[in-house]
């Protein structure tokens, strides 16, 4: 009897192992469709060629909860001098930015014009360290550390 | 005239070629008019007064002790042949001019008076006029007529009361010269063309247009000049007759000094040398009489032309937003315009800018622009407070930086500084920045545990089979 229960559990749980992958796939498709349609619902989108990653950018309060990239309220507009984008540290948003290296490219777009940035640094900062976010001609990607106690930022400079 | 003298004159005429022409004399005796000539206190001679005509022209007897013994007379232009001096000649001309025939003097008595006054240059001491050849007949009184003639003669050489005086005036000012002697009408005026003039009875009004010193000549009108002639036949003893030209009149002149007029030029500016338009000034003369009111323009402002002298300038109405200048400025105008620079200080008001966080003061930097968008002030708060002195006007306050942890307030704050809102406070609120909460949701471990559990389960099932 126990063997049957374990077999059934293994069978069912094996499906759960694929759910995140499926959800991520669906989300990527959705993002690509949004970018393609360009219906002005969002401010723009980000593209990280290294990970073949794309996501929309918005400044609505629920943007983070919707796994979108959040244009922070202390950021300049897309194309501005000091852009700070925040995203959750999960597989849909910014968990991959930990793997960005110096020289990697990041592209942001306002649907009309693309802006190319090159990574120059990355580091952890305290949650009240706003000075580290003030860099001219920069695009800064910001996400939480794994323990949520700090912030991890990737600093890129416009090319 | 003694015989020797007459002979001498006759001989002179024989040797000197003088162009003379014989003319016929006629006499028209006047009934009831007899003259008695007194010399040495007694009657020297007497006779019936005639009108003497030479070719129809009235001539006077100037030799009462001789009678007309010929009808042919010769005309001579040399009055000295009469034996009288040039001074006497002029006196006789005056008598003749103002005597019989002068305006209002056309009566017989004026003729008698004229003749008497002429005779009195001879040795006659006194003339008595009677109505017949009887010394006891009625005497004719012509004293009034004689006095009238003498009065006119006395005034003949009287110049206008303003003659030979220097006058001073200013360019484009009128100066009125009054002739209290009432003889101005006898003269023609020779004057520079830059001086407009007008004669109104006894007033001469001059209005010069160019500065300088001018001599104005007053010349007798031309009709006062003509010839005095004597008539005689020096070859015989006969009465010398004469006709008189109009007596000469003296010229005179006055000197007119025309001073230039200049202007007071006011440069009215603020502390930044910007011209201020609309400030009112009064200009006073040395006696504090107002001579001009001017309002400043956006360039140099000139008074009207003013004669040289001392003037005072005072601001009477300032521009809104500026401190009134209560100084009294003294200006001495001479030969050129004088400039006066008056600076008005702006009234400044203290505007307090407070930069606020959620519930506390924070520091921020601000720019203040004027209504034209020019940056006029840039500064930062200290302990959240910034005090700025600003003149009246409309402004825009813009926050340009703020303490860390606060969002820049991008709203432009329009505010006005005036007499009502001279001390105003502007509070600028800044939202506190919150670092986005980007939670880390990593299910890798869960999935790994589930994966390991499944592997373990599979081994367990396989082993128990």
Image (spheres, rainbow, N blue to C red):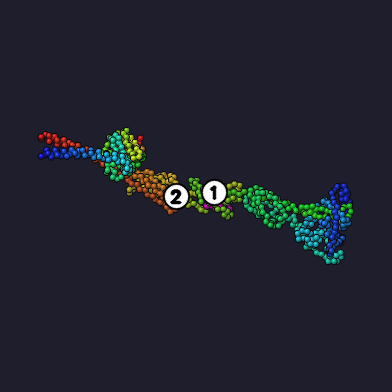
Compared with residue A148, is residue B221 higher up or lower down, i.e. above or below? Answer: below
Which residues make up the magenta segment? B279-286
Q: Chain of mark 2?
A: B
Residue placed farthest to the front in the image? A37
- Please give the name of the residue rendered at 83% of the width and 56% of the height, measured from the top-left corner: B54
Compared with residue A156, is residue B321 higher up or lower down, i.e. above or below? Answer: below
Can residue A56 be seen here? The reply is: no
Q: How would you rate the neighbour count of disc 1 (Cα within 10 Å): few for under 14, some for 14-19, many for 20 or more?
A: some
Can residue B136 be seen here? The reply is: yes
Q: Quadrant of the C terminus of chain B?
A: top left
- Please give the name of the residue rendered at 65% of the width and 47% of the height, measured from the top-left corner: B212
Using the image, tell me which numbered label, if any, was put on residue B444.
none
Q: Is residue B282 magenta?
A: yes
Q: In the image, residue B61 lies at what x, y percent? A: 84, 57
Image quarter of residue B120: bottom right
Q: For marks 1 and 2, give the CA distance.
A: 25 Å
Q: Is residue B311 magenta?
A: no
Residue identifier under label 2 = B393
Q: Quadrant of the N terminus of chain B?
A: bottom right
Q: In the image, residue A23 lies at what x, y percent? A: 23, 40
Using the image, tell me which numbered label, if any, was put on residue B301.
1
Residue A136 in the figure: left or right of residue B47: left
Q: Main secondary structure of the magenta part?
A: strand
Q: In the image, residue B304 lies at what x, y percent? A: 58, 51
Front residue of B37/B345: it is B37
């Amino acid at each position: 009897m126990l063997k049957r229960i374990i077999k059934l559990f293994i069978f069912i749980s094996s499906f759960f192992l694929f759910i995140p992958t499926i959800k991520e796939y669906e989300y990527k498709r959705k993002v690509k469709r949004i970018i393609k349609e360009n219906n002005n619902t969002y401010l723009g989108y980000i593209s990280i060629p290294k990970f073949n990653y794309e996501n929309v950018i918005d400044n609505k309060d629920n943007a983070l909860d919707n796994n979108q990239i959040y244009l922070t309220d202390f950021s300049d507009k897309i194309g501005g001098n000091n852009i700070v984008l925040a995203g959750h540290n999960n597989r849909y948003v910014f968990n991959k930015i930990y793997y960005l290296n110096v020289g990697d490219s990041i592209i942001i777009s306002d649907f009309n014009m693309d802006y190319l940035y090159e990574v120059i640094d990355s580091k952890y900062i305290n949650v009240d360290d706003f000075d580290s976010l003030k860099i001219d001609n920069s695009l800064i990607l910001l996400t939480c550390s794994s323990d949520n106690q700090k912030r991890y930022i990737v600093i890129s400079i416009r090319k | 005239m003694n015989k020797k003298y007459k002979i001498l004159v006759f001989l002179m005429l024989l040797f000197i070629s003088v162009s003379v022409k014989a003319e016929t004399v006629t006499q028209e005796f006047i009934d009831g008019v007899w003259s008695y000539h007194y010399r040495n206190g007694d009657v020297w001679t007497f006779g019936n007064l005639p009108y003497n005509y030479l070719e129809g022209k009235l001539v006077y007897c100037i030799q009462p002790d001789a009678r007309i013994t010929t009808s042919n007379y010769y005309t001579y232009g040399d009055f000295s042949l009469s034996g009288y001096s040039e001074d006497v000649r002029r006196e006789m001309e005056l008598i003749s001019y103002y005597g019989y025939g002068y305006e209002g003097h056309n009566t017989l008595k004026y003729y008698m008076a004229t003749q008497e006054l002429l005779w009195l240059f001879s040795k006659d001491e006194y003339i008595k006029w009677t109505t017949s050849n009887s010394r006891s007949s009625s005497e004719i009184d012509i004293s009034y007529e004689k006095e009238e003639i003498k009065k006119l003669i006395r005034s003949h050489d009287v110049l206008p009361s303003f003659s030979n005086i220097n006058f001073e005036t200013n360019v484009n000012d009128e100066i009125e010269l009054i002739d209290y002697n009432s003889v101005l009408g006898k003269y023609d005026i020779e004057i520079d063309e830059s001086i407009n003039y007008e004669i109104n009875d006894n007033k001469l009004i001059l209005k010069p247009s160019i500065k300088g010193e001018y001599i104005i000549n007053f010349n007798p009108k031309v009709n006062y000049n003509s010839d005095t002639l004597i008539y005689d036949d020096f070859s015989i003893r006969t009465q010398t007759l004469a006709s008189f030209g109009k007596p000469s009149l003296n010229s005179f002149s006055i000197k007119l000094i025309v001073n230039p007029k200049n202007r007071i030029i006011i440069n009215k500016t603020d502390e930044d040398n910007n011209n201020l338009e609309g400030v009112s000034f009064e200009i006073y003369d040395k006696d504090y009489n107002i001579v001009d009111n001017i309002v400043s323009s956006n360039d140099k402002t000139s008074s009207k032309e003013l004669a040289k002298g001392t003037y005072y300038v005072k601001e009477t109405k300032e521009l809104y937003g500026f401190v009134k200048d209560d100084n009294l400025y003294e200006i001495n105008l001479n030969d050129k315009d004088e400039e006066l620079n008056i600076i008005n200080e702006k009234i400044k008001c203290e505007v307090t800018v407070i930069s606020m966080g959620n519930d506390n003061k924070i520091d921020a930097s601000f720019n203040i622009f004027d209504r034209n968008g020019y940056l006029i002030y840039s500064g930062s708060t200290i302990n959240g407070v910034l005090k700025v002195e600003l003149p009246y006007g409309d402004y825009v306050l813009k926050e340009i930086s703020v303490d860390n942890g606060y969002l820049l307030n991008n709203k432009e704050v329009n505010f006005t500084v005036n007499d009502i809102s001279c001390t105003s406070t502007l509070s600028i609120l800044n939202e506190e920045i919150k670092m986005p909460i980007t939670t880390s949701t990593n299910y890798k471990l869960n999935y790994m545990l589930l994966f390991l559990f499944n592997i373990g389960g599979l081994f367990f099932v396989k082993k128990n089979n």
